[in-house]
Image (tube, coloured by chain):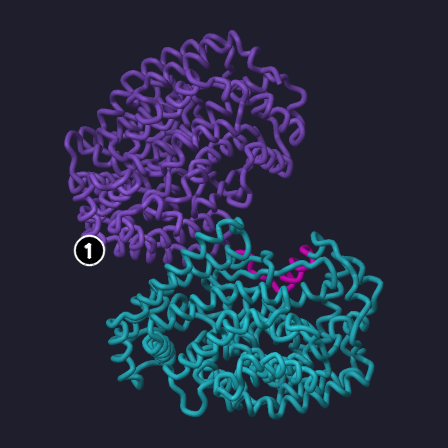
Chain colours: A cyan, B purple
Amino acid sequence: MSEQTHLFQDEIVKKIIEKTRVLWALKHALSLMSWDLETYMPPRGVEDRSVAFEELEGLLHRLSRDPELEKLVEKANERLDQLNDYERGVVRVMKRMLRIVKLIPEELARREAKVSSEATVVWREAKKKADFKMFEPYLKEIVEIQREKAERLGYEEHPYDALLDLYEEGLRTRDMEAIFSELVPATKRILEKVLSGGFYPQNHPLEEAKYDVARARELLKSILNGFEWPWDRGRLDESAHPFTIELGMNDVRITVRYEGYDIKRAVYSLVHEYGHALYELQIDPRIARTPIGHGVSMGVHESQSRFWENIVGRGPWFIPWLKERMDKTIGYTRDYTLLELYRYVNTVKPGLIRVDADEVTYNLHIYLRFTIEKKLIEQSLNVDEVPQVWDDMMEELLGVRPRNAAEGVLQDIHWSHGSIGYFPTYTLGNVIAAMIWRTLWSRSQELLRELRLAELRRWLGENIHKWGATYPPKELVKRVMGEEITAGPLIEYLEWKYLKLPGEVEDYLKP
Amino acid sequence: MSEQTHLFQDEIVKKIIEKTRVLWALKHALSLMSWDLETYMPPRGVEDRSVAFEELEGLLHRLSRDPELEKLVEKANERLDQLNDYERGVVRVMKRMLRIVKLIPEELARREAKVSSEATVVWREAKKKADFKMFEPYLKEIVEIQREKAERLGYEEHPYDALLDLYEEGLRTRDMEAIFSELVPATKRILEKVLSGGFYPQNHPLEEAKYDVARARELLKSILNGFEWPWDRGRLDESAHPFTIELGMNDVRITVRYEGYDIKRAVYSLVHEYGHALYELQIDPRIARTPIGHGVSMGVHESQSRFWENIVGRGPWFIPWLKERMDKTIGYTRDYTLLELYRYVNTVKPGLIRVDADEVTYNLHIYLRFTIEKKLIEQSLNVDEVPQVWDDMMEELLGVRPRNAAEGVLQDIHWSHGSIGYFPTYTLGNVIAAMIWRTLWSRSQELLRELRLAELRRWLGENIHKWGATYPPKELVKRVMGEEITAGPLIEYLEWKYLKLPGEVEDYLKP
């Protein structure tokens, strides 16, 4: 507490922080419940856990509608000019939260929760049977609810803006349109060259290699140790789908999955999650447990995971470092050269499944989803037309066509959760990660070229992580990178890595 | 939900259950937070966890003071005669809870929580230094707070009654006095004979035997498997101090500790915790998440753990079963006979430390604490006199004298937590366990003699477990055993096992 007095001087802001601590504590408990559900909970505990979630989420919602808190925030908002950046951040985040809670009536929130929980069950079944018709009525209701939410939340230009803003403060439809209008044609152009160039393979024999799970665990531990992972502040566990969860800035937990073959899948999901985790671990401890004491948005969070996964981890600089650890643990990589390992972790292949997509093709998957979501929300597309549009766009963008709904429109869980407006933050993350790459590349290239991990961490910590949600995402990016968010840096990065680097990659691959 | 309608028909009781579900959910979250704190939480997460505990316990307290809930309970209480046993149980438990919450003002509860959390830190340090003076001022304040609590809660005969009742509904000082007045002299008499008899040794060479922790894990797993532990409804983990926690009746978690030597310590703490766990696992699913959906009291809970640990687990019937599993895992027991193994797990030695005490001497440790607590609360003893009284009583009861406060008055954590009135429930548990033994012994001895584990579980489930807190503890015991709680059965059991059994033990030890 005493540390916080340095940052928070304003009496009203201090009261706001005091009053929101119970909300923080409830979120802490809910996060632990989620983590436990995915890792250690005995299977039949699920019914009680669901009831507990429902009760505590409802309670969180009720406690968030605190009129006293609202008054304090309004009062603080009237004297923003007397507040420092941290205090202003608290007021901004709280205003946003209270506005959303206020504009979404409890009845709608409950309906959304109910439909989502049913839809998730049906989606799983529908995906198994590759039967979109099963899922269609649920998706219809979800789209209706999201449209109603958009109307209630309000927007200036496009109803989809209201939903985008829920995941990424201030993100508008036209921001994403501007990004995709440059990125999509550039990606298609680069992809064509990569596919005809032959340096980056579409498949690699190592993808077939089976590994021993115990050795893979050793490998992943040695990677985290190489990153100086603070085991006293974090954990590594296993779950069906990898994720990172923050229970506090001294308790950040990663999970991974071991499939038993194609080790790069486990390695890069670890490095991805590490990027998320590092963000939370490096937030200024003085803003712990306050409304600004966490990553600012989905997009900025994803920029961190993508930066580590793709720009650090799939860069040539990472290969000698990784091979050393692979050789010591899973062993079979000893028979391969550094160049082969680099090509193994950088296959490029137009495919049907987003989560398996490479750096080059990934954003085309997002563009497809963005287009469909936008049209659903503006009512220029009906839910029953979605599979057709999906398949046609896949063919047009990636030259592949799903044989069924399971590998097409039903592949992602997001819509069943009611998340419409979430997907674009993935591309936004890629875009911001590339902005970080360009900034480093022009100012201090050696951090990447020489894989100076501690300095990379420090740079990210000082420039991005430590602020938490003090500044809104767009402002944070502008402060660090000195420019607005555009697709330019990502295109530049892809051109550098996929068109230029093949000619000089040996220079980077010296151990 | 639908299942509950069979049991709960009364509209007001149904409303009470509905309203208390959020309290259940908060307790579920708090239990998970406790479990995680002791098992998997990264060490530096402790600060955030403490804040979360404080906030959510405060919230639970505030939500419990719900005037609407109180009105409903009052209303239901006016028509008790129209309610069934389950409904009446709900009303009784809620009345009790609301009464306690109402009579203890928030300020006192907060003071208690604050002192306890400070006192626990100081106690740890004081114990390390064996310095009672360090802890004395804290114990003084704790006694004062508990005395104030007793006055506020009210009592008919003795202020200590009010505190006993917090841990064991309806337990009075004179109940424990009646038990100890028989049990203490009988114990001393039996102990003397055991020590001079020579059958039960004071020490055993196997106590020095070191074990491999991985093999011990296998052993404990095989014991739980032998008990048909439902792994889909429970877990086994490791923590500094063994405990059982119930997150729901389909999520019950045991922890144990492996010290690396004297395997019986790990084995019997597992069997002890299993007794607690089985109670929660066998509660009627139709009362899940209601105010009666958990073990009824500390004493009845302890009777279950003690029954499994001592009566089942340290009985001669258990030895062939245990040896088979030990021989297969830790292995070195192969060199010992069944009789030797029986003697190893049944050493009797008057010692200084309660948690290391055997079946015979254990209750003398509780009698000492009961006597001191009672005197502190009735103000016939000052806190600064406690060490002297402790040491003198140890010498008188057990013939051993602590060399310092660490092995005397500072050995237990309970007082630092503010728990005064808790210790007697340990002896009550032993007493009730022996009542179960006598009931079984006279009606269906073969369940023990032939170690019919499934039938034992079923008997306990049908007679005790399934009811949860439907009946108050004394009434439950009377219903099952047909008599009031007295020390008689425990004395009879100790005489049978320690005086009679040595002459015929070989009859039981056939594999």
Q: Quadrant of residue B26?
A: bottom left
Q: Amino acid at mark 1?
A: Pro
- Residue B498 visible, this angle: yes
Image position of A309 (left or right of B34): right
| Residue bearing the label numbered 1 | B67
Above or below for A108 versus A213: below
Residue A227 within the segment the image draws in magenta: yes
Image position of A114 (left or right of A78): right
The location of residue B300, given as percent across then percent down, is: 36, 32
- Residue A455 visible, this angle: no
Question: Residue sitting at 40 percent across and 69 percent down?
Answer: A111
Looking at the picture, tell me which residue is in the foreground, B209 or B157.
Answer: B157
Q: Which region of the structure is painted magenta?
A: A217-232
Give SS at disc 1: helix
Question: Residue sitting at 36 percent across and 64 percent down?
Answer: A58
Q: Quadrant of residue A293?
A: bottom left
Looking at the picture, tell me which residue is in the foreground, B103 or A404.
Answer: A404
Above or below for B140 versus A493: above
The location of residue B28, given as percent across then percent down, is: 40, 51
Q: Chain of mark 1?
A: B
- Number of labelled discs? 1
Question: Residue sitting at 43 percent across and 81 percent down?
Answer: A147
The location of residue B343, given as percent across then percent down, is: 54, 17
Residue pushed farthest right? A335
Magenta stretch mostly in which secondary structure? helix
- The quadrant the C terminus of chain B occupies is top right
